[in-house]
Image (cartoon, grey):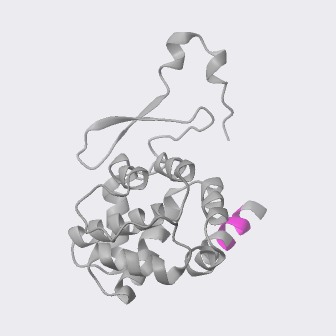
Amino acid sequence: MQRSVSPSALPLPFRRRRHKTFSHEGGQNTRAPLKSTEFITVDQAMKYDEFIDQVQKRAHLTSKGEAEIATLAALKTLAECLPRKERNDIASQIPRSLAVYLKQPSLGPVKQPPPSTKPITTLEEFFQRMSIREEVPPEIAREHAHAVLSVLADALSKGELEDIITQLPLEFYYEFFEGRIKILWKERKT
């Protein structure tokens, strides 16, 4: 792991250049701000098309459009479960065009469930709200959630994945992340 220098220790001109250039869905180069303690290279960052393609394969969807809708619905619903800081941390590690839906879950083309003043605390509620967004039965939304969150887990750093798990109710861990965490712990031991 690379160690970083505190931004305040750098001369002023260098403090303003905390960006990494990478390519996303349109093949255009964009700039995304990085945390001062985190370095993500172009090779490490999962690109938009790769993310959507993986969702399409894992959910056995017939089109890229279906995978995009499932992804947006899952990310927006996940955003309702997490505090803003955690959503921003996740957003810094996924393609910008998807990150916006974690930062501002009310944006986008998918249908919105009625606003809620409290965070989602049960899997049943998670699948119900996702099914409203995706306009599919809750059973289908569950399959799509598994696909999207497994791709998300692959796109995130180990530390960020562990942070998400600590922020969610325990039943979310067993439903979505248990197998992935076991793999991470095996990797750490070797």
Q: Which sits in the foreground, 90 or 44?
A: 90
Quarter where residue 184 is shown: bottom right
* Residue 82 x %, y %: 54, 60
Residue 172 visible at all: yes
Q: Which sits in the foreground, 93 or 60?
A: 93
Residue found at x 28% / y 83%? 136
Residue 86, magenta (yes or no): no
* Residue 115 x %, y %: 38, 66
In the image, residue 109 sits, relative to residue 179, either above or below, namely above
**The C terminus, quarter of image:** bottom right
**The N terminus, quarter of image:** top right
Q: Which sits in the foreground, 139 or 62?
A: 139
Instruction: Kindly report the secondary structure that dominates the magenta region of the rendered protein.
Output: helix
Numbered disc total: 0
Residue 190 visible at all: no
In the image, residue 98 sits, relative to residue 9, either above or below, namely below
In the rendered view, does 152 fall on the left or right side of 47? right
* Residue 133 x %, y %: 30, 72
Residue 186, magenta (yes or no): yes
* Residue 56 x %, y %: 32, 72
Residue found at x 44% / y 41%? 42
Residue farthest to the right, as pictured: 189
Residue farthest to the front, as pictured: 117
What segment is highlighted magenta in the picture? 182-187
Residue found at x 49% / y 70%? 150
